[in-house]
Amino acid sequence: MDMARRLPQLVRRSVALAWTIDRWAALGLLVCQAVSGAMQALGLLAVSRTIGALLSSGDVYGRLLSAWPSLAMLAVAAAVRALLGIAVTWLSSRLGPQMSREAELRLLQAVTEVELSAYDAPGFTHRKEAADRGAEIVQDLVTDGQDLIASLASLVAGAGVLTALHPALLPLLVLASFPQAVAQVSAARVRYLARLRAGGDHRLLSILRWHVCDRYTADQIRAGTMAGFLVTRYRHITERINRADRQAADTGARMSVLGAVCGGLASSAVWAAVVWLLSNGRMSVGHAGTAVFALQTVGTALRGLVAGGARIMRTGLYMDDWSEFLVEAGGYRMRRGTGNPAPPQEIRVRDLVFRYEEAANDALRGVSLTLRRGEVVALVGYNGSGKTTLARLLSGLYLPTTGSITWDGVPTADLDPHAMWAQVALVPQDYARWPLTARENITLGRPTEGGDADIHAACAQSGADEVVGELRSGLDTVLARDWLGGQELSGGQWQRIALTRAFHRPAGLLVLDEPTSALDPLGEHRIFAGLREVAATRAVVLITHRLTNVAVADRIVVLDKGSVVQEGTFPELVAEPGLFRDLWTYQHTRETHRPGEPTGPGEPAAPASTAAVSSVAAETEGA
Ligand SMILES: Nc1ncnc2c1ncn2[C@@H]1O[C@H](COP(=O)(O)OP(=O)(O)OP(=O)(O)O)[C@@H](O)[C@H]1O
């Protein structure tokens, strides 16, 4: 029932997709199949006439002469069908891959248009991966659909001819085919359900394969001696799938045998009917001969229809992953305003509460603060206190759950997101290492009017000038080892490139999330020494755990468990008791302690003597 209900919908869907891509090819395929079916009917009629003429009375030459026109018709029908078969293969192989590429493009488009929060929805990424496989397999719909339509055309042709030969033959054949058809549908259903149940396992396998083969996990798999563990896990899942597949194959085979036995018995009845019609003169020998061919044609077409239906159902299962994901992505589509912001003079946060999708607690609660152009604001706090989340909200990557964030008085939800992000330069903790040229890695596809001169200026600010200077083909070098002529960078060199991206972008808000975590002390010093200059035309948000560096900020906002617990300048915060002074004292003591002194957690930390704190504050201010 499921198959019968979904088949027309699947065929319609694949024809619709094919139609939007290449309507002539789609039309050509449908016409070819229809004409091929007509040729098959014509061929069967020609067979009937040929047999009739050959078995008639008269000399051999006379009989051959009278059989000649129908023989010619048979040959023409066969030749046209052969040519149509070639045309179908040609059109399918043109259309199929295009359909997959189109499906992939629609997927990419849908994914780039969803809110970032969609990725936090449980299973979103897995469903996206399944949709990806669905898009790849969409091309099979063309061949599966063609097989189905070809079988249908043969069935109609054979059935038409049989009815013309004798009205009783078709109902008899339908009765004879029924057990086989039921057996095949049941077997296909068993395999289909097994496949459906194993869907999760198949996805798991593909994720595991990706992680095991990826070069960025290759070192950890080796150093962590994980290969055996991962391969064993993979083998366990494969065994589970194999077990289910074997079971389905065995059950399917049992059903097919049962169907074949019943079908064989029923077919004997059809043949007996043909013999009976022949013996009492109700059917000519020529018609009986044609009936043999027509019965074979219809039988093969019925089997083809069921097998093709089962295949298209399986392909449809994958295609469902694709189309369901597109619907899901549509639900997460960004629906924001159309405001086109200038570089913001002031970003205001009021009573901000934010909770990630499906999270049990708020990541931010009751946060209020103001950022101004030309100002560096540092966010400080323990791991998980909400710094990155707040930075993402300030950049408009997320929208507040309650409360508001405004850019020069306009809520971020009312701004056009793409126009807004053109005003954001972001250096996240995990920056992308695009397998593109150094130039493209810096401009991100948005070169400025100054061209390479602007790139070199940004490189000088970030310290990437040394990195680019050592590249084989300068800015034209592809930053990926596996690519021809590519060159791989170290972690710190990549971070300099990520910083260059942000400095190069003419954006009004600069967000630096742990921007120097991989830099050497000299590189780090260079960034912070130049930060004031960078901030002259921007609002800068700086997140770092290295508290010596936050002295550069105009204001420091201290977060704890998603709330702002302190706000002030560096000297103010080191002078007043609170989380910042505790963190500072602990870090500073660790950095300046002599070996052997107790400093770790659980060991008595040095007391925060006001004198020590103020001396360090003065020292840092001086620096
Ligand atoms: N995508 C997410 N889905 C659900 N919860 C998240 C997500 N990202 C972060 N969180 C949770 O939100 C809280 C704040 O995380 P956030 O990354 O903002 O902290 P952070 O202060 O930047 O931490 P760190 O110093 O480690 O970078 C944490 O409790 C974290 O578990």
Image: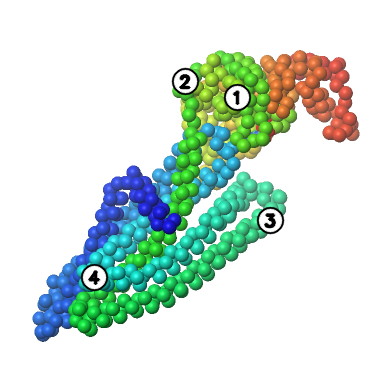
Q: Nearer the viewer, mark 2 or mark 3?
A: 2
| In this rendering, position of residue 67 left or right of residue 544 | left
Q: Amino acid at mark 4?
A: Pro
Which residue matches tag 1? Answer: 402
Q: Nearer the viewer, mark 4 or mark 2?
A: 4
Which residue matches tag 4? Answer: 167
Image quadrant where one finds the C terminus: top right
Quadrant in the rendering for residue 371:
top right
At x 36%, y 56%, the residue is 145
Q: Amino acid at mark 3?
A: Phe
Q: Earlier in the sequence, mark 4 or mark 2?
A: 4
The disc at residue 340 is 2
Q: Residues within 10 Å of mark 1 (few under 14, many from 20)?
A: some
* Mark-to-mark CA distance, 4 and 1: 74 Å
Which residue matches tag 3? Answer: 229
The answer to whether residue 452 shows anywhere in this view is: no
Q: Amino acid at mark 1?
A: Thr
* 450 relative to 345, above or below: below
* Mark-to-mark CA distance, 3 and 1: 45 Å
* 13 relative to 193, above or below: above
At x 63%, y 23%, the residue is 352
